[in-house]
Image (tube, helix red, strand yellow):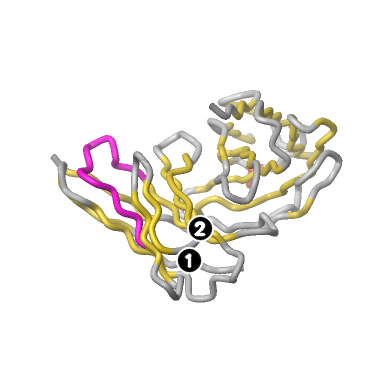
Amino acid sequence: LAKTTQPISMDSYEGQEVNITCSHNNIATNDYITWYQQFPSQGPRFIIQGYKTKVTNEVASLFIPADRKSSTLSLPRVSLSDTAVYYCLVGGGDDKIIFGKGTRLHILP
Amino acid sequence: DVKVTQSSRYLVKRTGEKVFLECVQDMDHENMFWYRQDPGLGLRLIYFSYDVKMKEKGDIPEGYSVSREKKERFSLILESASTNQTSMYLCASRGNDEEGQYFGPGTRLLVL
């Protein structure tokens, strides 16, 4: 199972673009990279998933280099409501994916 | 919209009681999961199921069992609750490989 490493915490300001990078050096060929957001006292919420290159949706972008050993979640123009814990996961066919401890993102006014 | 519901948001039980946590999803997903989340430890997988009557152990199955009699329902059972099972319990479901998991709101269980 691929292990992920991401910063424990980050601070940013409203209106800024925030990039959170995750390392996953032993990612397997069939693994996807998935990011979740979690607010206090709620279950995690799926943000974005990708396999390679770049994926964009209405919430975020996900950049994956060719070697797939890392990925970067990009949140454009963050607001106070983006303060949350963000989890990077890798996993695939066996469905047994591991949540790490996540990155605690704190957005300041 | 996928909806995953859990039977209780808050639950208080006594040591030794049998506890049932129910999870229901309405999207016909094959895969369902039970996690517990504790401060400083993140989410840890207890059990998962990829089909009716099928179950697989996660990372911390000890003290728990599960039941999947119907596709939409996945139950977590604490046969004899202990204080170290006080935690937030999260259920999730997933469809195909290209989707993420959809989580329920969680059940905060306190075992006295």
Q: Looking at the picture, tell me which residue is in the foreground, A63 or A1.
A: A63
| Drawn side of residue A39 relative to residue B85, left or right | left
Q: Is there one chain holding both mark 1 and mark 2?
A: yes
Q: Give the range drawn in magenta.
A: A72-84
What's the residue at 30%, 53% (across, down)?
A74
Residue A52 forms part of the magenta stretch: no
| Up-down relation of residue A106 to residue A28 (above or below) | above
- Toward which corner of the image does residue A65 lie, by quadrant? bottom left
The residue singled out by tag 1 in the image is: A4
| Drawn side of residue B35 relative to residue B105, left or right | right
**Chain under label 2?**
A
Q: x and y percent of residue A56 in the render?
A: 37, 49
What's the residue at 43%, 44% (across, down)?
A47
- Toward which corner of the image does residue B109 lie, by quadrant? top right
- Toward which corner of the image does residue A70 lie, by quadrant? bottom left
> Of the residues shown, which amino acid type is indicated by label 1?
Thr
Residue B13 visible within the image:
no
Q: Looking at the picture, tell me which residue is in the foreground, B86 or A97.
A: A97
Q: Looking at the picture, tell me which residue is in the foreground, B73 or A67.
A: A67
Q: x and y percent of residue A63 in the render?
A: 36, 61
Determine contact: label 1, label 2, CB under 8 Å.
yes
Q: Tell me which label, 1 or 2, sits earlier in the chain.
A: 1
What's the residue at 54%, 75% (across, down)?
A26
Disc 1 on helix, strand or loop? loop
> Of the residues shown, which amino acid type is indicated by label 2?
Leu
| Drawn side of residue A85 relative to residue A10, left or right | right
Dot 1, how many residues are within 10 Å of its Cα: few (below 14), some (14-19), or many (20+)? Answer: many
Q: x and y percent of residue A72 in the render?
A: 35, 61
> Which image quadrant: the N terminus of chain A?
bottom right
Q: x and y percent of residue B82 in the render?
A: 70, 42
| Disc on res. A89 | 2
Residue A75 forms part of the magenta stretch: yes
